[in-house]
Image: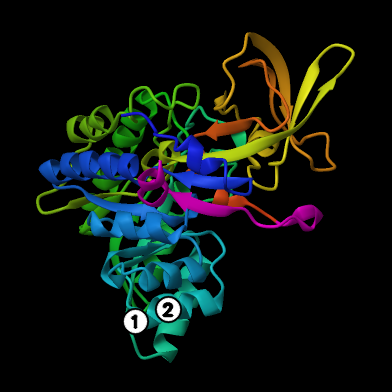
Amino acid sequence: MKTKFPINAFRDISTPFFYYDLDLLNTILSEVQQQARQLGYQLHYALKANINDPVLISIRKKGFGADCVSGNEILKAVETGFDPKSIVFAGVGKSDDEIRIGLQHHIHSFNCESLQELEVINHLAGGMNTQAAVSLRLNPNIDAHTHRYITTGIEENKFGINLWELNQVLEKINSFNNLTLIGLHFHIGSQILDQSVFKGLCLRINEIQQWFEERKIRINHINVGGGLGVNYSDPDGNLPDFNTYFNIFKQFLELRPGQQLHFEPGRALVAQSGSLISRVLYIKEGIKTRFAILDAGMTELIRPALYQAVHKIQNLTSSGLPLTYDVVGPICESSDCFGKAVILPQTQRGDLIAIRSTGAYGEVMSSSYNLRTKAKAYYSKDLLNHE
């Protein structure tokens, strides 16, 4: 299913802006949820990928829970209708106020990343005369083979409890009156395209489960996080391969009787449904290249500057002969570049440009650097009716 661009409607809208194809989003959500339910898996959408209200409401209506990494994300999830009992709260640095928000809403689980965090949650829960359901986020020391900034599952990363700490952690948990251990949590990275690493995660979890069984500790659920990547070079091609992804866990993860399996997808659900729409301000001839200077910049999409990410770039309004451009933004930083040596039909001032697959980590990471006005969002359900 391809994204439909209502180009005539775009011409009347001030750029830059984010455009969401909600039909495509709902198709992806329906397919993923159907596959998960057939296997009995529980899904929590990772809000950090996109917190746009219509996007969140679409996800909630499809029966997803919420994976949050801040107190404000918990509040946003509740505000947009997610059941607090479906909310999990991760993050290596939860503040006291954020923990209290989770406790006040009686969320499903705090995914805890250190012994000291467990101590703090126990203390705050005691002060509120309540119990906190906790899962231990363990660092399995699995290399996700992705960008070093989004690898989270090896021992040099700040995330998770190291396996050699487990004895001490469990001794302490037994003395905490306001915590209930319900699960184990893992997340090894983001934008993972080599799915064999998930098999490695399954095998490591099997070893860890055996360790808990030997100590007669029952774990209600296993949460394997998210991380499934998307094809940024071909956003209209195959959708993220959740079928292979889920079946790896079905084949290699040894769940115990009655044990639930939870996932936290984010990018793979929302990335392909979003595009950043921009106008060409100027064409500038350089010594060795020509520049297409857009009115969108790293303030709207920071991934290329931060991760050296490559998004597909399309000229929506030109059918000229192909030429090569460096596609850049207006921000006063040399890193404000969306792509080098990009082949586009001959491009001129005023052309509409779509930067694809920005439904994840686009709008949510935007900023007002250089006192830029925040880009608005528009939706297929509104614009396609005016074509």
Within 10 Å of disc 2 (Cα), the crowding (few <14, some 14-19, many 20+) is many
| Secondary structure at numbered mark 2 | helix
Q: Is residue 292 left or right of residue 376?
A: right
The answer to whether residue 96 is visible is yes
- Residue at horizontal 44%, vertical 56%? 47
- For the question of whether residue 361 can be seen, the reply is no
Q: Identify whether 355 is placed above or below 105.
A: above
Residue range of the region highlighted in magenta in the rendering = 368-387
Disc 1: CA contacts within 10 A as few (<14), some (14-19) or many (>=20): some
Pointers 2 and 1 in contact (C-beta within 8 Å): yes
Q: Residue furthest right?
A: 287
Front-lying residue, 349 or 205: 349
Q: Residue at x 44, y 39 (%)?
A: 271
Mark 1, residue position: 177
Q: Relative to 86, say whether 236 is above or below.
A: above
Hey, which quadrant is residue 305 in on the image?
A: top right
Is residue 314 placed above or below 122 in the rendered structure? above
Give the CA separation, mark 2 to mark 1.
7 Å
Residue 82 % position (x, y): 31, 67
What kind of residue is marked 1?
Asn
Quadrant location of residue 312?
top right
In this view, the residue in front, 376 or 177, is 376
Does residue 165 belong to the magenta stretch?
A: no
Point out the tag, 2 or 1, that comes first from the N-terminus: 2
- Residue assigned mark 2: 122
